[in-house]
Amino acid sequence: MQRVIVIGTTGSGKTTLARALAARLGVPHGEQDAWNHLPGWQEAPREQFRARVAAFTAGDAWVMDGNYSKARDIGWARADTLVWLDYPGQVVFGRLLTRTLRRIAWRQELWNGNRERLHVQFTGGGILAWFFRTHWKRRRETPGHLAAFPHLRVVRLRTPGEAARWLASLTPAAAPARPPRPA
């Protein structure tokens, strides 16, 4: 497991798990949301986004998170392992609601100066509405997408507890060797 893609629905904890996994393996972490969301919530041009994914995944070892179909052919093809956070809707929605309200209250910057706004959550463009449009659809479609990449080792995690146990079971990256002390 050296080139890993972490997928899951909005709010499932992809980035949190991917960062922890990258630290555990001692490899770089890449976040597709950071490459896609330009200042002012503008979407990165397709070719610019694909170039970022291609550059990052050209390395020998990495962990990347994201569900972007516009670069699936690059990231999934180069990965050796796919971790799918396939949690029930009520679990994800509870986490997403809490996270979104916390980000709004603390005015947390996400990517490139962007922040979530309360009034946007009551429109079709908010992250909560996005969850309802995509969660069940992704659960149905992911097995078909996986069939197109039979080389991938798939780790399907169905609860946050299962994900925590799986991560804890992995051998941490070796600590850097220290030179011998002079006698």
Image (spheres, rainbow, N blue to C red):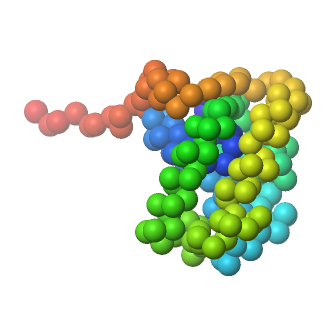
Image quadrant containing the N terminus:
top right
Number of residue marks: 0
Residue 113 drawn at (x, y percent) = 57, 75
Residue 52 drawn at (x, y percent) = 72, 59
Above or below residue 88? Residue 122 is below
Q: Residue furthest bottom?
A: 40
Relative placement, left or right, of 77 versus 117 is right
Q: Residue at x 78, y 47 (%)?
A: 134
Q: Residue at x 45, y 35 (%)?
A: 24
Relative placement, left or right, of 11 versus 54 is left
Q: Is residue 101 visible?
A: yes
Between residue 142 and residue 122, name the one nearer to us. Answer: 122
- Quadrant assignment, res 82: top right
Q: Residue furthest left?
A: 183
Residue 110 drawn at (x, y percent) = 56, 65
Image quadrant containing the C terminus:
top left
Q: Residue at x 56, y 53 (%)?
A: 97
Residue 67 drawn at (x, y percent) = 74, 46
Q: Residue at x 22, y 33 (%)?
A: 180
Relative placement, left or right, of 2 versus 180 is right
Between residue 61 and residue 169, name the one nearer to us. Answer: 169
Q: Is residue 55 visible?
A: no
